[in-house]
Amino acid sequence: MTVKGLLSEDLIRERLRDVFDPEIHISIVELGLVYDVELNDEGEVTVTYTLTSPGCPLGPVIDGQVQDVLIDLPGVKKVNTKLTFSPPWDPRTMASDDVKMQLGIW
């Protein structure tokens, strides 16, 4: 834990479960869109994530949701987001089994 024991990567990832892809209404964590979470002792959180497609028009909505759910955590002073498409999202290997079932991917 960092920031005087208030934050952990697990806590941040748990909070990110409240961020849903607006088009398919599934958590970005369950979809496998969150690639990395970093935090430092100054309360700065960085989330590296991707979108279901590079042309996703709702990318800014997801980015805003990430900011909103994390900035209220005790000890968080700043939230940075890094959008990446490397590696490209592949639901067959990155999504949870529940999501694969919902999307009909087997």
Image (cartoon, rainbow, N blue to C red):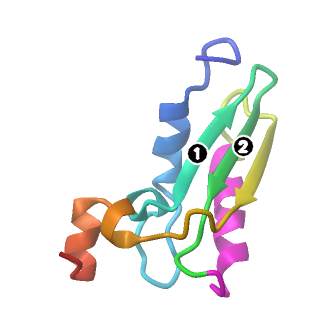
Q: Nearer the viewer, residue 64 or 48?
A: 48
Q: Which mark is residue 36?
A: 1
Quadrant for residue 51, please give it: bottom right
Q: Is residue 58 magenta?
A: yes
Query: As rendered, which of 31 and 73 lies closer to the eye?
Result: 31
| Residue farthest to the front, as pictured | 87
Instruction: Tell me the quarter of the picture where residue 29 sits.
Output: bottom left
Task: Please count the marks in the image.
Answer: 2
Q: Residues within 10 Å of mark 2 (few under 14, many from 20)?
A: some
- Residue at 74% across, 25% down: 40
Q: Is residue 98 above or below residue 46?
A: below
Q: The residue tagged with tag 2: helix, strand or loop? A: strand
**In the drawing, does residue 91 fall left or right of residue 47?**
left
Instruction: Give the residue displayed 61% in from the left and 14% down from the top.
Output: 5
**Which amino acid, by three-letter code, is at mark 1?**
Asp
Question: In the image, which is nearer the foreground, mark 1 or mark 2?
Answer: 1
Q: Quadrant of residue 99?
A: bottom left
Is the residue under label 2 in contact with that under label 1 (CB below 8 Å)? yes
Other-residue count near label 1 (Cα within 10 Å), few / some / many at <14 / 14–19 / ≥20: few
Q: Over which residues does the magenta segment extend?
A: 54-70
- Quarter occupied by the C terminus: bottom left
- Residue 74 location (% of width, % of height): 67, 29
Q: Is residue 45 magenta?
A: no
Q: Amino acid at mark 2?
A: Thr
Query: Along the horizontal axis of the image, is 14 left or right of 51?
Result: left
Q: Main secondary structure of the magenta part?
A: helix
Residue denoted by label 2: 46
